[in-house]
Amino acid sequence: MLSKIKKLSLVILIITMTSCQDDFLETAPTDSVGPAVALADEASMQNVLNGIHRGMYSQSQTIFPGGNTARANDHWWVPQGDNLTGGIIHSADANNLGWRDNMQWNDHIIETSLTNEILWYHRYNIILHANLIIKRIDEGNLIDTPTLRAIKGQALTYRAFALLSLVQHYSKGYLIGNPSTDPGVPVILEPQTTGPRGTVQQVYDQIGKDLDAAITAFQNAAPRSTGGPETKSQLNINVAHGIKARWALSKGDWQTAATSAIAARQGFPIMGEADWKSGFNSNSLPEVIWGSNVIGTETTFFRSYFYLMCNTFNGSQNRSNPKIADRRLVDAIPSTDYRKDVFLKDAPNSNASAANGQGGWANNTNPLYTTQAQWTAARNAIRSQYGMTSGHNTHPYMHVKMLQKNPGTIDPDDIIYMRTSEMYLIEAEAKAMMNDIPGAQAALQALGGARDTAFNATTFATQAALMAQIKFQRRVELWGEGFGYTDHIRWDEGIDHGANGGSGASIILYQDAFVIAKPSVNNKWIFKIPQAEINANPDIGPGDQN
């Protein structure tokens, strides 16, 4: 494996837990604390797991040698799925943390880009430490207890999660390629080893084995603790089922996708309107199955998901560049659907540097504002209602879906990775693809009916009509949560900001990314293997590059 990851074989993550609000990561070389000591018992292995949990949201240089402060792992990766595919639209030119480069498709297609390197490093970091735990347990000289089974279940689930993330970014999509021959990513099952790319099918097969083993381990394991938002940082059987649902959906195993999605959401009811509009900032929301609880002492400040995404965060990325939604999507949301409320269609364009050149009162075209006083009052009302500062700009179609608990600050908030609504949508899509029309309608009604008082899934009576509505519901319900990239690949859909009246994106800002051909004919959808990996891994050569 890459030299930076191999160096991690000389470092074991150790968490000193003093309380749920005061944990920190330490490292110790194996000449002082070797694997046998660091993984001596359940408590030690749980500490290593806690290191993986923390690594999901910490800045990458705290996780592996050679990391970079510009990426705080899934603070960055979660929104990129929608940034790359144009779901999240930039209203002005701002390139903090390479956010604009990624949006313009000038980043992931370069072998030496930080984005490619950090995603690769982080996911293999997870695999390394999961392997250390799995190997220690499989040695068989520890007493088999419910707690030990839960630890093994988490390690196996993490390995599957990391492999799925890697193969979905660095390989061609399963449904649009030839998985039996398409190059996959290295499947590393032993600590401190390297490996060749193998095939996409081999990677998918290993993910399935890991998830089945994880679910078996969890079935007789100690349950995940209940209580505050910190408990949902730990993985459990629901998370394993949820990742299995994603895995199966991405490979067209529709029955497994539906069954796993139903299992994943058990115990996590769909949230109501008040919760849905509360800002998506806490694992405490009832339908959150898995997320990182980002505690105040470990904030990443201007590296966080909310810094990139949230229009109330007090950072330059947000004040000068409010994120907007595709106006074609927003306009299509029925007025009876309360999700429409989090997209401010009529917000004044107060940014003199707006990418569309229409910022300021002098360029106002909204007939709602016939005087500058009305226009200014509308801008100020939005700032006041949502806790923005006087420096925050507004823009038509800006979102207020992601909101801070303490708006107008740089305080940290949780990152949500998996929730119940996604599982209903997976079930609906899988059943639609099996042509189980009543089953797909029922799953779709459970979600759509909870969001829209007039929703009636029976009006979508064919597979084509159901799939069109399921795609629409995913784009509305999961907007900003990072699923756009994998959805586009699974559905083999390209990007066209100019079609059907236009998305609201500026072609001057978006450049070549304004139109992107569909994944089956455009290999730019596949991330480049980091050049540093090719240089360091004897099992991967220049000919293995995407």
Image (cartoon, helix red, strand yellow):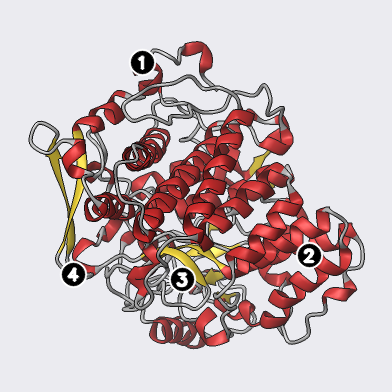
Label ID, residue 469: 2
Q: Nearer the viewer, mark 3 or mark 1?
A: 1
Residue positioned 75% across, 51% down in the render: 254
Kindly identify the amino acid type of the residue bearing the numbered disc 1.
Asn
Give the labeled residue for mark 1. 535
Give me the residue at 31% from left, 39% from top: 136
Q: Closer to the camera: disc 4 or disc 1?
A: 4
Marking on residue 19: 4
- Kind of residue sitting beneath label 3: Met
Q: Nearer the viewer, residue 44 or 104?
A: 44
SS for callout 2: helix
Q: Is residue 260 above or below residue 525?
A: below
Sequence-wise first label, 2 or 3: 3
User: How far from the left and from the top, in percent, is residue 115?
Assistant: 40, 38
Report x, y in % for residue 455.
Answer: 78, 80
Q: CA distance from mark 2 to mark 3?
A: 24 Å
Distance from the alpha carbon under mark 4 to that under mark 3: 28 Å
